Image (cartoon, rainbow, N blue to C red):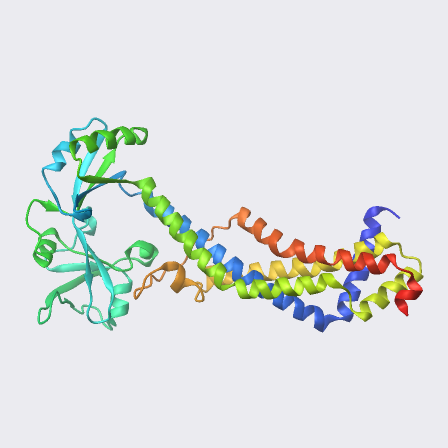
């Protein structure tokens, strides 16, 4: 018999053997798939957030200049703009105005900003909101005014011009855009002062040279590059993904105990079945191959089921189990649909950590039983 026909016959026998113990095997697949589901969901969600963050940062300025006073960020004057703009390689320098506002109504923190694009600048006295702000405020009808309180007994009214699209909710969920005059009046920011400076460089390879020259001109300033922000996001998502994996550690531990118990021996029914197979002429290699097929079918099926459920949970249902932890907003959570970003390396790692150990755990007890005398095994 050729090797292909031999393994096809072994596979047919294995499927029939699994069907005879369908309740036990289905329970095993469900437990196994639940462990894979938890780990795969955290991996899929974190990988998609990394991709969204990378796409968002692609349009960020090459360099951000922040003034430091006593080790903390302070307002920076307009006098720094021509100094940095005069550096060779700098194409544009823009002063930015942004800050945070604590909402006493629901305990949320909004990011208030003056947009740099004319298309995103609302008329005076009006604001453009991220998609989550009307949701957490409970606005039920179009045209509801937005009241913001800076202190006890103070209310400032803004009319809502429009709401930003949900596809940008990852970075704009808590955003409030207003004109420069309204921003300076609301936060009492004097003319000639900015929160920081956004610097655009013609050639990204010259960024380090630009930072070196700007540091000499502004020794008290801090320079944050786009790569620095990207690394911070990556570390943040890695940490939150690790939190989710740690929460799933109990399930992983239970599965490890189960796999270890599987490796210690076979049930009486399974040992008797192996003894009968040996008595009717099966080789030890045939028995081991059959059990490897059995472990591979169970673990592989559970792996595919768990990954499929994780994909549906993250990309179709919006990951309701993990979103509050991985998205990171304390009160305002962005409502957006993630783009699938399946990481083959992570899938391979998950496969190696879950599927192969279980399949391999069946080899030792099966070998011990198959190598023994068939009559002794059946007795």
Quarter-of-image position of residue 275: bottom right
Task: From the top left corner, tell me how far across and down residue 146 is, in percent.
Answer: 16, 67
Quarter-of-image position of residue 320: bottom left
Task: From the top left corner, tell me how far across and down residue 199 is, in percent.
Answer: 22, 37
Q: Residue furthest front?
A: 70
Q: Is residue 309 visible?
A: no
Q: Residue at the spot x=18%, y=54% of the render?
A: 99
User: Which is more toward the observer, 362 or 31?
Assistant: 362
Q: Residue furthest left?
A: 191
In the displayed structure, does residue 378 sit left or right of residue 316? right
User: Which is more toward the observer, 308 or 165?
Assistant: 308
In the displayed structure, does residue 80 sit left or right of residue 322? left
Quarter-of-image position of residue 250: bottom right
Q: Is residue 109 visible?
A: yes
In the displayed structure, does residue 232 sit left or right of residue 364? left
User: Which is more toward the observer, 114 or 240?
Assistant: 240
Task: From the top left corner, tell me how far across and down residue 104 is, in percent.
Answer: 19, 70
Q: Residue at the spot x=27%, y=28% of the render?
A: 209
Task: From the top left corner, tell me how far across and down residue 249 is, in percent.
Answer: 53, 62
Quarter that holds the C terminus: bottom right
In the displayed structure, does residue 282 sit left or right of residue 196? right
Residue 49 to residue 38: above or below: above
Query: What number of labels is visible?
Result: 0
Q: Residue at the spot x=45%, y=56% of the render?
A: 241
Q: Which residue lies furthest to the top in this view?
A: 88
Residue 214 to residue 96: above or below: above
Q: Residue at the spot x=29%, y=31% of the render?
A: 208
């Amino acid at each position: 018999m050729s090797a292909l026909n031999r393994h096809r016959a072994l596979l047919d026998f294995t499927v029939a053997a699994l069907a005879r113990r369908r309740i036990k095997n289905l329970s095993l697949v469900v437990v196994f798939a639940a462990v894979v589901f938890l780990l795969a969901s955290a991996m899929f969600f974190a990988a998609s957030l990394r991709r969204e963050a990378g796409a968002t940062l692609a349009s960020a300025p090459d360099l951000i200049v922040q003034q430091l006073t006593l080790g903390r960020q302070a307002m920076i004057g307009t006098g720094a703009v021509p100094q940095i703009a005069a550096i060779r390689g700098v194409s544009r320098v823009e002063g930015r105005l942004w800050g945070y506002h604590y909402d006493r109504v629901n305990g949320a923190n909004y990011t208030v900003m003056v947009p740099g694009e004319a298309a995103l600048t609302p008329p005076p006295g009006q604001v453009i909101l991220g998609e989550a702000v009307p949701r957490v405020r409970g606005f039920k009808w179009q045209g509801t005014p937005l009241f913001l309180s800076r202190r006890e007994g103070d209310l400032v009214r803004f009319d809502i011009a429009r709401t930003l699209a949900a596809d940008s909710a990852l970075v704009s969920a808590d955003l409030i855009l207003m004109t420069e005059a309204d921003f300076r009046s609301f936060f009492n920011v004097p003319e000639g002062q900015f929160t920081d400076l956004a610097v655009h460089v013609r050639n990204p390879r010259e960024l380090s040279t630009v930072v070196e020259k700007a540091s000499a001109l502004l020794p008290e300033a801090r320079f944050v590059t786009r790569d620095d922000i990207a690394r911070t996001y990556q570390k943040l998502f890695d940490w939150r993904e690790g939190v989710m994996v740690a929460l799933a550690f109990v399930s992983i531990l239970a599965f490890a105990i189960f796999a270890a118990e599987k490796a210690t021996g076979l049930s009486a029914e399974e040992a008797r079945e192996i003894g009968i197979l040996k008595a009717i002429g099966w080789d030890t290699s045939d028995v081991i191959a059959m059990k490897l097929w059995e472990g591979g079918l169970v673990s592989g099926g559970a792996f595919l089921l768990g990954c499929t459920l994780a994909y549906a949970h993250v990309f179709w249902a919006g990951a309701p189990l993990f979103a509050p932890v991985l998205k990171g907003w304390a009160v305002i959570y962005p409502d957006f649909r993630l783009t699938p970003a399946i990481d083959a390396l992570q899938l391979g790692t998950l496969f190696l950590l879950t599927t192969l150990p279980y399949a391999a755990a069946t080899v030792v007890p099966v070998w011990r039983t198959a190598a023994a005398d068939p009559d002794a095994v059946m007795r």
